[in-house]
Amino acid sequence: MREILGRRRRLRFRRSERPAPPGTALHCATAWRWPVLPGVGLAATDSGSGPGRSCACPDPECVVPGAHPFDPGLLAATTDARMVRWWWETRPAAPVLLATGGHAPCALSLPALAGARALLSLDRMGVRLGPVVATPTRWSLLVAPYSLERLGELLYAKDRVPSSLRFHGDGGYLVLPTSQTGAGKVRWEREPAVGRDGRPWLPDVETVLDALVVASSGAPGGGSRLAY
């Protein structure tokens, strides 16, 4: 009997120590040390799988369906493996949200067409990019953590900053692949390149800001609608 119990304990331990598949919430939290939490997700009554599905939150006019924190709130974001595992065992279809800022990556996002244009421009200039997250409506470039003060100084030097360019820093969040939201599937346009420390390499915000300001200046409609 003791042998059987001992075997069961060892099996449970081995399962918990298995490395999480790359790109999952558990991998982001444990291997990359990115604080994550589950997004609210989409309404269970929806039968479709494409864009236009409704949010599971109480707001019938939610402009970012499925792609925002609700319960738990953003402050619950963690790198604790037990908490993250429990969340996604309970809600396996929940979108993965990265709580940006602090020691975690920040991001700059812009409309998808402008994002594609910006990447071409940055590639031509030979700029090394970090991970790029893409949805059908917006692309987000992940960058090294920056403070609001630093960002303010960089933006102050610009003649104009288009409203379609958005910043995900302290107190912000970003939906990560391979989440499903009301706008559609979230994917990697540029996959993370992991450095020697086992974490994705990230460029400095100043390195990419100029190209994104130029690209988003010509974004159709000015990007006034908050869509991820």
Image: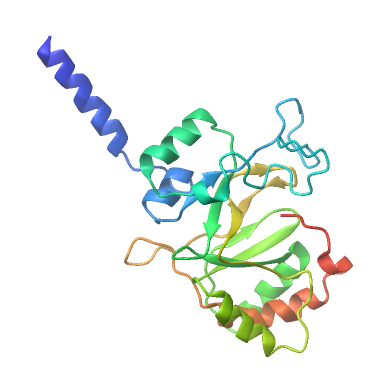
At horizontal 75% and vertical 36% (from top left) the residue drawn is 58
Indicate whether 182 appears above or below 120: above
Give percent across and percent down for residue 110.
72, 67
Q: Give the farthest residue toward the right.
A: 221
Give percent across and percent down for residue 19.
34, 43
Q: Give the image's coloring scheme.
A: rainbow
At horizontal 54% and vertical 54% (from top left) the residue drawn is 98
Indicate whether 77 appears above or below 13: below
Query: Dividing the picture into quarters, in which one does residue 49 lie?
Result: top right
Q: Is residue 87 left or right of residue 9?
A: right
Give percent across and percent down for residue 194.
40, 63
Q: Nearer the viewer, residue 207 or 43?
A: 43
Q: Nearer the viewer, residue 17 or 68?
A: 68
Indicate whether 125 appears above or below 36: below
Q: Can you say which quadrant of the picture contains the N terminus?
A: top left
Q: Is residue 29 left or right of residue 209?
A: left
At horizontal 49% and vertical 35% (from top left) the residue drawn is 88
Q: Give the farthest residue toward the top.
A: 1
